[in-house]
Image (cartoon, coloured by chain):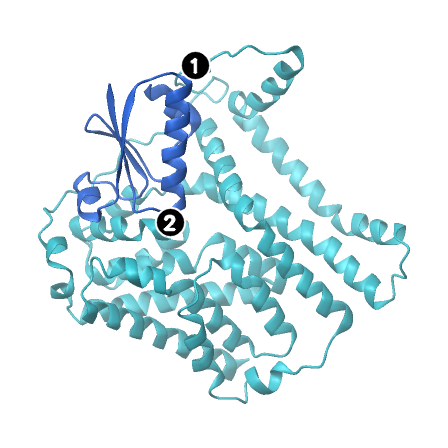
Chain colours: A blue, B cyan
Amino acid sequence: MKNVKVLGAGCANCRNTVKLIETIAAEKSAVIELEKVEDMQKIMGYGILSTPGVVIDGQVVHAGGVPSRQKVEAWF
Amino acid sequence: MAPEMLPAGPAQPAPVRRHGSSILNAARRWPQSHPRRFLGLAALAWAAAYRALIPISEALVAALPVDRASHLGGSLQFFLYDTPKVLLLLTGIVFVMGMVNSYFTPERTRALLAGRTEGVANVMAASLGIVTPFCSCSAVPLFIGFVQAGVPLGVTFSFLISAPMVNEVALTLLFSLFGWRIALLYMGLGLSVAIVAGWIIGRLRMEGSLEDWVRNMPSVEARVGDDALTLAERIEAGFAAVREIVGKVWPYILVGIAIGAAIHGYVPEAFMASIMGREAWWSVPLAVLVGVPMYSNAAGVIPIVQALLAKGAALGTVLAFMMSVIALSLPEIVILRKILKPRLIATFVAVVASGILLVGYVFNAVL
């Protein structure tokens, strides 16, 4: 099971990113544990410069803007 | 770089396709497989469409059962010409800027600014604010990331003020609706406010007014991530920018142009001139006072700007209003409060508001 964290303080792009990941994970029937990280201090701990960011199993895989569909599909 | 090759990356999954959609798919992938040819053809098509605007809008109005010389005819022609013109310009510029943005990632901008001394770096930061993609929800991570990498506080502020205020959407809209002089003036004055305000904040030595947890973050080395994108991927970034930005702002533009068209055709009395004309000295501070709590992007203020200008409000007053709406807002102040102590927030708002005030007065006095 993959642990997926979406970093971002509740902006529209962050919500869209969460939705996109949920949809694609469901399509690919990948089992994931999805977490939203909204605390600024924790977000900065990952060293990203722009939100939303995506962290999979502790690794930052994306930062800044909603990721493209292909990019998300490649994760699962 | 071999532009004729397919971009590297995971192959497209091949879902079950019906016959018709495979042609559509091929067309959709064509910009990716032939990026240079696509750019050349797109530029030609864009220029042709732009040149055809006036004849087409005239032909459309002529086909309608209204007199071209009437108020309604004038308004309709204005609307039918301006709407596609502004949308076409905006789409073209946002697309190009989407590609340009892919060179100026926040990481690269930070690396360019890290360790520089104030002065020239304020100018650089404000200018980079135009080309670096920025979303107000990223203001905090960006701010911390800059400070962490050793970008001076005042330089960080120059960037933070310029990035939302002076951007391609604001400039394109001002250019297409009010002409290149107003667009250039807005850009020059916006940059000046960002540079000077950042410089002043830097001179005040307020590093102590960052929240403690921000000051205690470990410092990091500014590095440029490996973002060697292919031309095809930059084109993809251009498309993404068009979808995101033009997709979001077009309703505001329609409303703005509709207001402009109504005024264009009917020319009401210049009743705003007495309240917001240049004789009323208090109009500039009032415009800033009203503008600061308002929260909108550049496209959202355009209808208001359009209406105010057409009814005789002074240009400096209107631009001051526009700047204060975009550059300062309550939600942004609330977000920044997480990392800045009240003293620094108050200084930031006061310095920027004074800068905008000055811009308004200078403008009204000169023009």
Q: Nearer the viewer, residue B161 or A39?
A: A39
Q: Which mark is on residue B11?
A: 1
Mark 2 and mark 1: span between their CA atoms?
A: 30 Å
Disc 2 marks a residue whose amino acid type is: Phe
Q: Is residue B301 left or right of residue A22?
A: right
In the foreground, A63 or B333: B333
Q: How many marks?
A: 2
| Above or below B104: residue B200 | below
Residue B210 shows in this picture:
yes
- Above or below, comparing residue B294 to residue B358 in the picture: above
Vertical relation: B102 (above or below) B298: above
Residue that numbered label 2 is attached to: B134
Tell me which residue sits at (79%, 58%) in the image.
B77
Chain letter for mark 1, please: B
Element on which disc 1 rests: loop
Residue B172 coordinates in the image, percent (x, y): 55, 55
- Crowding near pointer 1: few (<14 within 10 Å), some, many (20+)? few
Quarter in which the N terminus of chain B is drawn: top left
Which of the 4 quarters of the picture holds residue B106?
top left
Upstream in sequence: badge 2 or badge 1: 1
SS for callout 2: loop
The x and y percentages for residue B35 are 53, 26
Mark 1 residue type: Ala
Which chain does tag 2 point to? B
| Image point (40%, 73%), residue name | B356
- Residue A48 drawn at (x, y percent): 24, 40
Residue B277 in which image quadrant: bottom right
Residue B121 appears anywhere in the view: no
Give the residue drawn at x 58%, y 23%: B28
B264 displayed left or right of B196: right
